[in-house]
Image (cartoon, helix red, strand yellow):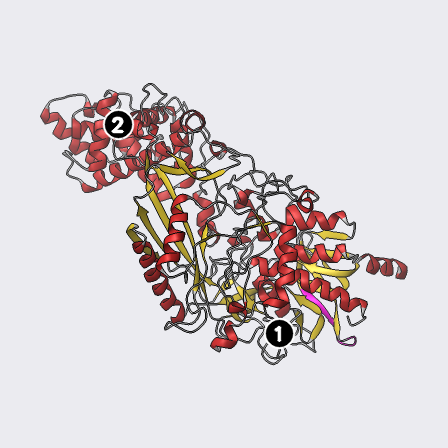
């Protein structure tokens, strides 16, 4: 789905020059080219890893192992490991993929995939650094800036809208996946299948 | 061959046939089989056996692939059932999918159905409030619908009878408008609900009340429940999945296994009833024609007495489709009123708020019910610019308070916190709607279902009385909340279509006069005495109480009456 099949009829491009240089001239050019190409940037990068499929079976999304790895980094940035496990260790990215695959409309799925494909470039354009290459605190700052539409250099409202929606979906499903996980519901907020009681007034 | 045919007819002959295995059909079958009648239950859906067929009952939250959310394709294909609050990943297998059983909405109507053994008794919300004469006398006092042919005294002992067996928890509140029953211990009101209760009693000079809802949960196991192999309600609050303890009442956990134990019950799932067979010569119904849901074969079953308990609107459909030269417009329909005067409960409005009291207290465990505010409007006389009134659900509780605006460590720290927010309070309305001839169901002249049976066309809507009542509910509950010191009071009117309340009633109403009603005071068709209707279709008016308990009482009462009449050879 989402053009990947079509894109992959082209010869995969291993080195894509758009973001190879940091100088401002090239950067402006890069943005221009990226805007022209739209999602194309992303599917080339996807194709180079196409042989490796995502590790869980998906019905509608056509995402590969590299996309999955990026998503894993995003969920880990949203809920990182600390004294307790982070989202990646709880396989929250798998839950996010399942929910996007099964519980979103085709329109929202497209926004999700577009967002996943373009987050790296978006961050590079707006924060000067690719998302994947940034450390976790920086990634969290990037996600916060996108969510709140703050400090963005992006001029294209459409790009901002997609990225904001994408980050929103990732956050919502990461929270749902984390707080609905076996770890969380046994270690943090133990869930009782059979409480056997209701007390209407107990001290906090 | 002739002998074979006779044998075959004999195999298909019973003393009683009950159409439908839901909450009222289960009761009819229990009474008949206990009284020694060979009884056949025809159920259009599949069999669902207690315990065995509750696939999700012991699943943990994380074991649901979508954490209890319904996938997009299912919602997209089933816009009606997806609106139902209980249609979630854990119980969606108990609900009818729109696509499989289409109907015609002349006006928007969300018809929520459960086609399986046990029907909706598996997923019902289990509230069981008795009616009083303030309800039964409503139509006569206020001049709408038809006078009920019975009063509270006719049903009192039957309420007690079904309550004892089903197991109804409740507090003896001594309210005229909501008579006490034969109760097991009540569920507990929490501190804010108790505070609200005492505040409201004082503030409204004991004219308004807040009580714990009466509900079909075993808060104590008596011998009669032990004999049903049912156990104590363990307060899982996962009832819609089917209860592994039999802690709440359902046909599956209670009446059907009880009836099977007598050896007198034949349960036939996958039996879509096409019509009740009327014999012109005998002047009575002789049986029921079904279409086997799987083989599509038409088969006739025969009995002396037939109980139609197919759920309110499907009972209408079956009777409308039971045509003969004596009854060209449907069985018993001499006055043309069959299918008309359908009503429901108005569940549109909600009010919520916050309470800063009891900051150092909370609740522990879960409770599968709520508090309840019985009707207080127009109880003894007409006081408002609308007829009748509403009951309300009420509940209070505290949720975790978290700031989820951040990302990264800040967000993670928030979800590890266990700080409680303030008490939140909420209420929803259950308004009486006035049955009208213009709110009706009929057979669609073209559309048929997979079994060749005409689809039901539903034309039911709100009216001005309902709009006024929504407004009054919001005003009154908001005022009650404000007077109790609740803050941040918000109200919503969902404008939801009729049907989503799952309390549709009427169309085959009871009454003394055969010119204005279909059923007599024993729930017998005036014009065909061996056919009884004791489900929601029989309701002359709706009042505000959750109706299932009254259906159960009607079913038990009518079954006993039918057996007596058979003994007297009147049937």
Viewed as shown, does residue A142 lie left or right of B472? left
Q: Report which quarter residue B569 is drawn in.
A: bottom right
Q: Report which quarter residue B357 is drawn in.
A: top left
What span is colored magenta in the figure?
A: B275-282
Check residue B411 in the rendering and tell me which mark sits there, or answer none: none
Secondary structure under the numbered disc 2 in the rendered image: helix
Above-or-below relation of A141 to B230: above
Mark 2 sits on what residue?
A: B410
Mark 1 sits on what residue?
A: B518
- Say which of B499 and B290 sits in front: B499
Is B556 included in the stretch rendered in magenta?
no
Q: Quadrant of the N terminus of chain A?
A: top left
Residue B295 appears at what percent x and percent y? 69, 52
Secondary structure under the numbered disc 1 in the rendered image: loop
Q: In which chain is the residue bearing label 1?
A: B
Q: Earlier in the sequence, mark 2 or mark 1?
A: 2
């Amino acid at each position: 789905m989402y053009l990947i099949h079509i894109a992959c009829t082209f010869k995969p491009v291993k080195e894509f020059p758009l973001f190879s240089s940091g100088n401002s001239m090239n950067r402006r050019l890069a943005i221009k080219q990226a805007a022209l190409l739209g999602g194309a940037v992303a599917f080339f990068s996807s194709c180079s890893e196409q042989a490796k499929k995502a590790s869980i079976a998906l019905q509608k999304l056509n995402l590969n192992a590299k996309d999955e790895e990026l998503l894993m980094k995003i969920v880990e940035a949203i809920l990182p490991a600390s004294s307790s496990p982070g989202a990646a260790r709880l396989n929250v990215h798998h839950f996010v993929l399942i929910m996007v695959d099964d519980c979103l409309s085709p329109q929202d799925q497209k926004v999700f995939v577009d967002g996943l494909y373009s987050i790296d470039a978006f961050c590079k354009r707006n924060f000067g650094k690719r998302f994947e290459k940034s450390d976790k605190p920086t990634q969290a700052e990037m996600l916060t800036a996108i969510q709140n539409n703050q400090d963005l250099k992006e001029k294209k409202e459409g790009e901002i809208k997609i990225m904001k929606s994408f980050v929103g979906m990732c956050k919502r499903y990461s929270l749902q996946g984390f707080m609905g996980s076996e770890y969380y519901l046994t270690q943090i907020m133990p869930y009782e299948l059979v409480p056997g009681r209701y007390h209407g007034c107990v001290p906090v | 061959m002739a002998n074979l045919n006779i044998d075959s007819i004999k195999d298909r002959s019973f003393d009683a046939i009950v159409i439908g295995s839901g909450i009222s059909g289960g009761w009819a079958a229990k009474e008949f089989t206990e009284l020694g009648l060979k009884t056949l239950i025809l159920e259009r859906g599949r069999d669902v056996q207690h315990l065995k067929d509750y696939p999700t009952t012991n699943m943990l939250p994380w074991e649901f692939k979508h954490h209890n959310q319904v996938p997009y394709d299912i919602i997209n294909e089933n816009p009606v059932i997806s609106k139902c609050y209980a249609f979630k990943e854990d119980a969606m297998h108990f609900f009818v999918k729109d696509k499989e059983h289409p109907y015609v909405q002349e006006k928007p109507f969300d018809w929520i159905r459960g086609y399986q053994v046990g029907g909706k008794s598996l997923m019902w919300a289990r509230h069981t409030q008795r009616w009083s004469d303030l309800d039964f006398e409503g139509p006569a006092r206020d001049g709408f619908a038809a006078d009920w042919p019975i009063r509270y005294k006719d049903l009192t002992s039957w309420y007690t009878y079904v309550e004892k067996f089903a197991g109804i928890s409740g507090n003896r509140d001594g309210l005229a408008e909501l008579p006490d029953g034969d109760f097991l211990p009540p569920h507990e009101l929490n501190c804010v609900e108790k505070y609200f209760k005492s505040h409201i009693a004082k503030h409204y000079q004991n004219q308004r009340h807040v009580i714990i809802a009466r509900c079909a949960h075993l808060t104590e196991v008596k011998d009669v429940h032990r004999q049903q192999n049912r156990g104590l309600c363990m307060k899982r609050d996962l009832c819609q999945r089917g209860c592994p303890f039999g802690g709440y009442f359902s046909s599956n956990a209670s009446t059907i296994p009880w009836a099977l134990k007598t050896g007198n019950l034949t349960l036939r799932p996958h039996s879509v009833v096409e019509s009740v067979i009327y014999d012109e010569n005998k002047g009575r119904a002789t049986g029921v024609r079904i279409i086997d849901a799987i083989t599509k074969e038409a088969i006739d079953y025969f009995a002396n007495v037939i109980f139609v308990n197919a759920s309110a609107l499907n009972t209408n459909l079956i009777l409308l489709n039971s045509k003969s030269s004596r009854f060209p417009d449907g069985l018993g329909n001499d006055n043309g009123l069959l299918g008309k005067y359908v009503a429901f409960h108005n569940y549109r409005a909600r009010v919520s708020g916050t309470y800063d009291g009891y900051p150092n207290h909370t609740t522990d465990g879960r409770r599968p019910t709520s508090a309840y505010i019985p009707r207080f409007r127009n109880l003894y006389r007409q006081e408002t610019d609308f007829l009748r009134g509403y009951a309300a659900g009420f509940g209070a509780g505290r949720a975790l308070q978290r700031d989820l605006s951040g990302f990264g460590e800040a967000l993670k720290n928030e979800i590890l916190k266990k700080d409680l927010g303030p008490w939140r309070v909420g209420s929803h309305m259950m308004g009486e709607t006035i049955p009208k001839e213009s709110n009706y169901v009929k057979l669609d002249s073209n559309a048929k279902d997979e079994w060749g049976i005409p689809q039901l066309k539903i034309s039911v809507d709100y009216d001005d009385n309902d709009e006024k009542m929504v407004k009054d509910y919001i005003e009154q509950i908001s005022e009650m909340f404000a007077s109790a010191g609740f803050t941040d009071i918000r109200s919503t009117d969902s404008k939801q279509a009729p049907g989503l309340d799952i309390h549709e009633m009427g169309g085959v109403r009871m009454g003394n006069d055969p010119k204005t009603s279909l059923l007599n005071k024993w729930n017998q068709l005036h014009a065909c005495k061996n056919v009884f209707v004791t489900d929601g279709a029989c309701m002359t008016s709706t009042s505000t109480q959750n109706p299932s308990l009254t259906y159960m009482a009607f079913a038990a009462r009518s079954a006993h009456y039918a057996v007596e009449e058979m003994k007297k050879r009147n049937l």
